[in-house]
């Protein structure tokens, strides 16, 4: 429903990596923009988006995102009726097609299941999920950080330098 907020996430089949190199991450991040258009994907022939008219009617507002080697997290705000579901399907289908084409001997499912779409319905979720999405990349550098003490400055430095998350946007980077 328009105005809804949802936490959307999915992981690779058998917990396998879904991002193998920088090009994979870039493709997914570009898709966050290019597929978020009511009339369909914004078509480009090159990676330089500044050469195109990028006017769009968004399906969703992407509030937060983070990409991990074997999964992703999104926090989405629905702008068009059914926009979260449509956008989520587009992301999964387009990225799977890209990944399987890029990795020539690969076919079939990339993700474990359909993406999980969890509506944010109460204050506890609304307060917790944005932090969860932002802090998720800490698992890469600080294993078991949720159960132990870590240096906060090192954690923030890592998050600010991590390219595959919206966290650094909040620092103007």
Image: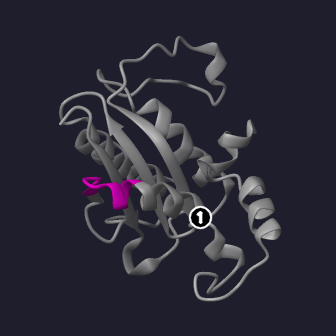
Residue ID for mark 1: 135
Between residue 103 and residue 124, name the one nearer to us. Answer: 124
Where residue 22 appears, x then y in whole percent?
A: 68, 54
Label 1 neighbour load within 10 Å: few <14, some 14-19, many 20+: some
Between residue 74 and residue 17, name the one nearer to us. Answer: 74
Q: Quadrant of the C terminus?
A: top right
Where residue 141 appears, x then y in whole percent?
A: 72, 76
Where residue 42 appears, x then y in whole percent?
A: 43, 24
45 left or right of 101? right
Where residue 147 appears, x then y in whole percent?
A: 59, 88
Residue at 50% x, 64% y is 132
Residue at 28% x, 41% y is 84
Does 153 sit above or below residue 82?
below
Residue at 25% x, 53% y is 121
Residue 104 seen in the figure:
no
SS category of the residue bearing label 1: helix
Question: Which stretch is magenta?
Answer: 118-126
Q: Quadrant of the N terminus?
A: top left
24 left or right of 7? right
Q: Quadrant of residue 36?
A: top left
Q: Total marks drawn?
A: 1
Does 148 sit above or below residue 61?
below
Does 99 sit above or below residue 1?
below
Residue at 42% x, 70% y is 12
Residue 29 colored in magenta in the image: no
Does 23 sit above or below residue 17?
above
């Amino acid at each position: 429903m328009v105005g809804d907020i949802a936490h959307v996430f999915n992981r690779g089949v058998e917990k396998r990596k879904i991002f193998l190199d920088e090009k994979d991450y870039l493709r997914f991040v570009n898709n966050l923009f290019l597929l978020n258009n009511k009339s369909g994907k914004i078509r480009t022939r090159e990676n330089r988006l500044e050469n195109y008219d990028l006017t769009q009617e968004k399906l969703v507002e992407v509030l937060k995102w983070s990409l991990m080697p074997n999964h992703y997290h999104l926090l989405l705000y629905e702008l068009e009726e059914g926009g979260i579901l449509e956008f989520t399907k587009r992301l999964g289908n387009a990225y799977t097609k890209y990944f399987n084409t890029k990795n020539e001997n690969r076919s079939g499912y990339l993700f474990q299941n359909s993406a999980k779409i969890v509506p944010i319905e109460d204050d506890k979720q609304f307060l917790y999920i944005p932090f969860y999405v932002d802090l998720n990349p800490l698992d890469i550098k600080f294993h078991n950080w949720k159960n132990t003490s870590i240096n906060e400055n090192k954690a923030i430095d890592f998050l600010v330098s991590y390219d595959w998350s919206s966290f650094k946007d909040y620092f103007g980077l």
